Structure formats: structure tokens, C-alpha cells
Amino acid sequence: TEQRRPTMRGFKIAHGTLGQQLRAARKHLRRLMHKRRRIPARVQIRDLSERTVVKLATERKHLTDIIKMLAYQAESDLFNLLRSHYPRAEQEGRTLLHELFAAAGDIHLTQEELQITLAPLSSPHRTRAAQALCELLNETATAFPGTRLRLRFAVRSPPLIGLAFPGTPAHRSATNAAPAS
């Protein structure tokens, strides 16, 4: 029965090379851990490579900072205009403006105007707030820089189609007249 029952000695003989490899791997790991402990937690940028660090010229950095400040100030002014038209302006006002800045739209050029019509936003109350903001901007009669074209902003109304409101009679007749595919 002793021959059938494996012993630790027999196991070590059978798997001796694996044990040696495991001991060598553990020793290597201890060396690496010791080496890692000697590396500083923070490294200076100049120590990372031999190449010189590219630093923006002071004037260029100032100009970049000024442009960022102007953009933030313009966003803040739009936010202040939006407050009276959007009840959740304090919580979501800047998010609404960012959605408005990224909205798809159409640009139409006439003799006197540059018309920008934006697509409806993610919800009707946001679209209404954006429409109110566009009306306030239109009252300023701002000209497009370098031209005499007046900027005209608008937001397309979302289609009034749903289970509760199936659309206008004209829309329903156009939908019914469309050929079935």
C-alpha cells in the first residue's frame, strides 16, 4: 500500500525542476521589489529623457490663457442670460450650454443675415430655454465679425408627434399620402 500512496519525497523528486524554477522566480521577484523600493516616488520631467522639454513661450501661453478666459467669460454671460428662462439653470445651466454648443444645425446666408438654426435639444424644456436664449441674442443685433451680416439664431421646434399628439393635420395627410415601402 505504501507504493500506491504518494509521499512528499516522491512528489519533490517528480517535480524537482518545477520547484527549482519556482524558487528562482521568487528570488528574482525579491530582487525586483528591492530595486523598485530604491526608485523615487516622483521623477522630474527633465530626468525622463535626454531631449529638452518643450515649453511654450511666455507670450504664447499668455495669449492661450486670455483666449480661455474670454471663452469662459462668454459662457458665463450666456449662463446669466439663461437663468431667467431655465428653472434648473444653477444645476444644469452650463451642461445645457455645452449641449447647445455641440448641437447640429444649419447655416443659411442671405443678403443681410447669417442665419444659424440649431436642431432641437435632448428634451422640450431644454429646447424652449435655448429658443429663449436665441431670442435674447437676436435682440443684440450682433454683426458677424468682418462683415455687415447680422447674426440670427434659432432652434428648430421638435416635431409634435407621439401617442398623445399624432401631429398636425397637414403632417398626418402627408404621412398617409407617402407610398408604403
Image (tube, rainbow, N blue to C red):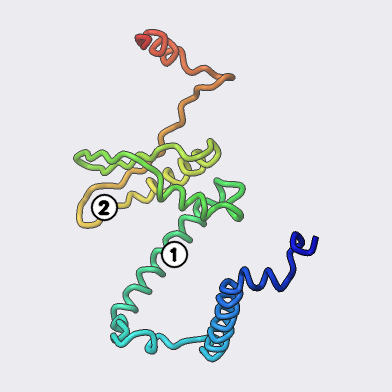
Q: Secondary structure at mark 2?
A: loop
The front one of 159 and 137 is 159
Crowd rating for badge 2 (residues with CA inside 10 Å; few <14, some 14–19, many 20+): few
- Up the image or down, 166 lies above or below 12; here it is above
Task: Find residue 72 and name its label.
Answer: 1
Tell me residue 74's x, y (percent): 42, 61
Between circles 1 and 2, the one closer to the viewer is 1
Disc 1 packing (10 Å; few <14; some 14–19; many ≥20) = few
Q: Quadrant of the C terminus?
A: top left
Quarter of the image for the N terminus: give it.
bottom right
Query: Residue flagged by tag 1: what amino acid is it?
Result: Tyr
- Give the residue drawn at x 31%, y 75%: 63
- Which residue sits furthest right? 1
Give the residue number, with chain letter if any, for mark 2: 144
Residue 25: give x, y in percent of width and height: 56, 78
Q: Which dot marks residue 171?
A: none
Question: Circle 1 sits in a helix, a strand or a loop, which is it?
Answer: helix
Q: Position of residue 38 (x, y in %)?
A: 54, 91
**What residue is drawn where x is 35% and y is 40%?**
105
Q: Residue at x 27, y 52 (%)?
A: 143
Q: Amino acid at mark 2?
A: Phe
Residue at (74, 68) in percent of width and height: 7
Locate residue 150 relative to residue 6 in the image: left or right. Answer: left
